[in-house]
Amino acid sequence: SIPRPADNKVNIRVQTTGDPAIDVFKDGLQDLIVMCQHVRGTFDNAVVDFRSKVPAQQMDIDSK
């Protein structure tokens, strides 16, 4: 969870049923790393795909 949107903090909660908490925490962090890598790769691929379909002149990035 994120305490407040403006904070650069994340609370990580891990529940265990007997395994050492540190091992469960490390496994959770590894899973988080894999998930973040997947999200980043998916985003980067979407950006490349978008840029290949829309010429730079048509991208309306300065108007609001």
Image: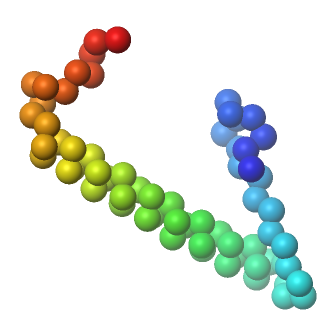
Q: Residue at x 9, y 34 (%)?
A: 55
Tell me the quadrant of the picture where the C terminus can be found.
top left
Residue 42 image point, x, y percent: 36, 58
Which color scheme is applied? rainbow
- Residue 41, image x and y in percent? 36, 60
Q: Quick one: which residue is furthest to the top in this view?
A: 64
Q: Whole-percent x and y of residue 56?
A: 12, 30
The vertical placement of 48 against 19, above or below, is above
Q: Horizontal placement of 64 versus 8: left or right?
A: left
> Residue at position x 29%, y 51% from top?
46
At 65% from the left and 69% from the top, the residue drawn is 29
Q: Position of residue 19 (x, y in %)?
A: 84, 88
Which quadrant of the figure has residue 54? top left
- Residue 17 position (above or below residue 54): below
Is 35 on the left-hand or right-hand side of 9? left
Q: Residue at x 28, y 12 (%)?
A: 63
Hey, which quadrant is residue 16 in on the image?
Answer: bottom right
